[in-house]
Amino acid sequence: MAIKTRKVAEGAEFGVRVAGITAELLEDDSVREEIRKAFVKEGLIVFEDVEPTTEMQLRLSTVMGPIKEHPARKRAKAELQTGLGEIAATPTAAIFEVDGNPRVNWQPWHFDHCYTDELNYARVLRAVTVPPEGGDTLFADGIQIYNDMDPAIRAKAEDLRIVYKLDLRLGNQRYGIPGNIRELRAPKDNIAEVAKQFPRAVHPSVWTRPTGEKVMHMAPYMAKCIEGMENAQGDALFVEIWEEITRVMKAYTHSWKPADMLIWDNLRVIHQAPGCDPKYERVMHHTTVKGDYGLGYFENGASIGELQPSTM
C-alpha cells in the first residue's frame, strides 16, 4: 500500500500530512518503510485521525527507531508505559506574560536534548487535552534556513560550535528572548537540582546530513556561548546569526486536534511553543526516538553525574 501525503500547509517547504494510518497498517513493513522515507525527505509528518491512545503513539514511534527515555525528566505518570512523557500546566509550571497576556508552557526556539552530548532522532507529540484557544506549536526547518540565509552570515556560522547548559529559567537565557516576554511565576520543579548533574554540552551550528543537505542547527534556548568565544564578541556573533535565522525561517504553525500525532526530525527541525492561557487545561504526551548524529560532546570530557561548577 502506498501512503498518501499532502503538504502540511499551502506553500510549505517541509512537512507533510498523512491520513488513514492504523495499527494494522503499521504491521506492514512496506508501509513502515514508506513512512520512514517520507520522514527523511520532509522532516515532519502530521498523522491525522489516528487512534488517540498511548499504545498507538508508542507503535508509531517505533517505526522510526527504539524509544529513548527523557534524560532529565520522569515519564508522565508511574502507571503509564516507559518512554512516555507529559507536558502540562501543573501548579509548579512557570507562567509568563506575552504581549500582556498570561501564558503557561511557553518555550522559545530550541531543539530537544541540546544540553546533553547525545541528541534524539525524533519526537512524537500528541494532544491529550486541547485548549479552546492557543496551545499551538511552531516548527522551522534547518535545511530551508541554511539555504535561504545571507551567504556572508552563513559563512560565519559554518564552523561554530554552540555551548548549551540545562537551565529553563527565563532570567538566565542569554539569547533569543523577545522583549514582549516576562516571567510572572518561576518554575517550582526540581529541574535546577537535576541540572547540576549535567555538564555543559557542545553541538555544531551547522552539520551535513547523510543525504548531503546542510542543516542550520542552532537555537537560543539554553545556549550559553559560542565555544571559544565566551565574550562580548561571541555574544554579538550569536545574535547576528540568530537574527538572520529568524529573518529567513518559514515556520509551520500546528494547531492541535485530539486525533493528531506529529513527529519531527530533531536533528533538522527546531520548534517553539507560544503557550496558552493558564486558565485552560492543555496536556501533551510525547515519546522520544533514539538516534544521534554523533557530533555532540560534553565540555572537558565530563560525564553526567560529575559534580559541576556553578555555570547556570
Image (cartoon, rainbow, N blue to C red):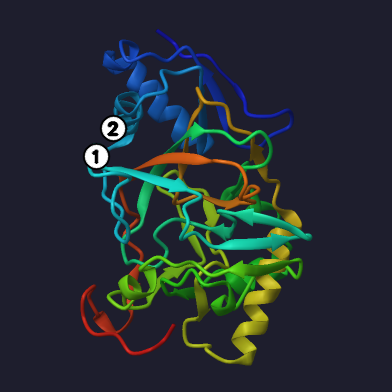
Q: Quadrant of residue 60?
A: top left
**SS of the residue under disc 1:** loop
Residue at image x 59%, y 71%? 157
| Viewer can see residue 177 | no
Q: Which residue is mark 1?
A: 66
Asked if the residue under mark 2 is in contact with the one under mark 1, i.e. CB atoms within 8 Å, the reply is yes
Residue 191 at x, y percent in the picture: 37, 68
Residue at image x 29%, y 59%? 71
For the residues labelled 1 and 2, the Cα–Cα distance comes to 5 Å
Residue at image x 46%, y 55%? 208
Nearer to us in this view, 246 or 72 = 72
Question: Along the horizontal axis of the image, is 219 left or right of 53?
Answer: right
Nearer to us in this view, 238 or 222 = 222
Count neighbours of disc 2 (C-alpha within 10 A) and say few if under 14, some if 14 to 19, many if 20 or more.
some
Nearer to us in this view, 171 or 279 = 279
Q: Quadrant of residue 21?
A: top left
**Quadrant into which the N terminus falls:** top left
Q: Which residue is mark 2?
A: 62
